[in-house]
Image: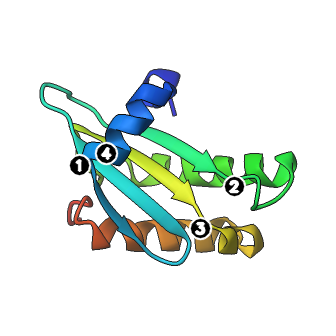
Amino acid sequence: MKKELRIKKNKEFQEAFQNGQSFANRQFVVYALKKENQEYFRIGLSVSKKIGNAVMRNQIKRYIRQAVFELSDLIHTGNDYVIIARKPLAEMDFFEVKKSLTHVLKVGKVLNRR
């Protein structure tokens, strides 16, 4: 995923938390914030230290980025998404992470139908 498609600044995270719509399942909490005049979507990731050491957290972030990359043609554009990982992700492999992320995005109605 290109770096300009990521949310990095704390101010942007806080704006998504305060003004965005949230939806969740056991593994993820996702905040979606509608952005006018934005032709693409941006992703911000948050993985707590409670989940594991740095190696585990970075692996989870790589899994999430790859899952978003594979789903990128289905995700609604013009939004910012903040994805918060929860503890059960520590025991999951990539395919389970992708399935769970797909589920939570369907719950939030941000995936287009194929």
Figure quadrant of the C terminus: bottom left
Measured in 3D between alpha carbons, the distance from the residue under mark 4 to the one under mark 2, in whole angstroms, is 25 Å
Give the residue type that dot 1 points to: His
For disc 2, the marked residue is 60
User: Measuring 20% from the left and 27% from the top, which residue is drawn there?
Assistant: 38
> How many residues crowd around disc 2 within 10 Å: few (fewer than 14), some, or many (20 or more)?
many
Q: In this orientation, does residue 42 appear?
A: no
Give the residue type that dot 3 points to: Val
Question: Quick one: label 3 or label 1, which is nearer the N terminus?
Answer: 1
Depicted 100 relative to depicted 29: above or below: below
For disc 3, the marked residue is 97
For disc 4, the marked residue is 18
User: Measuring 75% from the left and 51% from the top, which residue is drawn there?
Assistant: 57
Depicted 48 relative to depicted 80: above or below: below
Could you tell me if the residues under marks 2 and 1 are in contact, i.e. CB atoms within 8 Å?
no
The image quadrant that residue 21 belongs to is bottom left
User: Measuring 20% from the left and 28% from the top, which residue is drawn there?
Assistant: 39
